[in-house]
Image: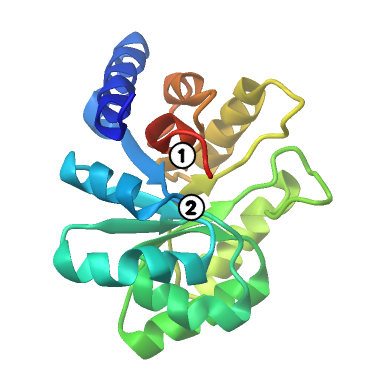
Amino acid sequence: MSVSENLDHIYADIKNAAEDAQRSESDVTLVAVSKKQPAERIDEALAAGHRVFGENRVQEAYEHWEARKKDNSDLVLHLIGPLQSNKAADAVALFDVIETIDREKIAKTVAKEMAKQGRDLPCFIQVNTGEEEQKSGVTPARLKEFYDYCYYECGLKIVGLMCIPPIDEPPALHFALLQKLAGQLDLEKLSMGMSADYEDAIKLGATHIRVGTGVFGERS
């Protein structure tokens, strides 16, 4: 199927999953993950009217979006991959939402860059719900302490939580945990669910789903 057809299919899935959960489909944002995608597929998504995209790497995001942002003032770009301190200035300049605040150093650096650039971007805290050693994110046990640091010490606009469940565990368990943690902090936004499991995520409260291959097809 074409990118446009894929988008229509996902929009229909969002509508059905939201209705099943007695939610409004307008409460769910599709973040189309464009990492490692060729220009023609990105342009096809834009031509279909989609305007919210996610990228994992700052440098690749610049290659994809620096020129396109100038031509599409309504674009919303989410950083959904790990952020290094030396890329913070570029990330704050390009992105509109940062979903991967995961440690004190990056929280402080991002806050400093936002102040310098006069930008006040909404941010998500990445939670390592599976407590995997190789994965970014704060553990659930440390979340409250880290949230307080981000909000009170750094002045970050923390709007929600984000997670990437372990590949060998039922994702719904992690979605439910993230929903519970967000409720404890009175946060409204949940970024969770990818191509294989976004419908489950919506039923458990996802406000943002991150879908790459489901939108664009297999990466080259």
**Depth check: 86 or 20 in front?**
86
Residue 157: x percent and y percent? Answer: 40, 64
Task: Tell whether label 1 touches label 2 (CB within 8 Å).
Answer: yes
User: Pointer 1: residues within 10 angstroms few (<14), some, or many (20+)?
Assistant: many
**Is 160 displayed left or right of 24 in the figure?**
right
Across and down, in percent, residue 62 comes to: 40, 71
Residue 48 placed where, x, y %? 18, 39
Picture residue at 33% right of the left edge, 45% below the top: 41
Residue at image coords 33%, 65%: 65
The amino acid marked with disc number 1 is Gly
**Among all residues in the image, which is located at the extreme right?**
133
Instruction: Identify which residue, 32 or 5, lies in the foreground.
Output: 5
- Mark 2 to mark 1: distance in Å? 8 Å
- Could you tell me which secondary element the residue under label 1 belongs to? loop
Which residue lies at the image location 33% right of the left edge and 72% below the top edge?
Answer: 120
Residue 35's tag is: 2
Look at the picture and state if 181 lies above or below 18: below
**Residue 96 relative to residue 177: left or right:** left
Q: Which mark is residue 42?
A: none
Q: What type is the residue that disc 2 sits on?
A: Lys
Q: Is residue 15 left or right of residue 198?
A: left
Residue displayed at 40% across by 37% down = 216
Q: Secondary structure at mark 2?
A: loop
Q: Which mark is residue 212?
A: 1
**Label located before the other in sequence (2 or 1):** 2
Residue occupying the far top of the picture: 20
Who is closer to the viewer here, 82 or 147?
82
Q: Quadrant of residue 199?
A: top left
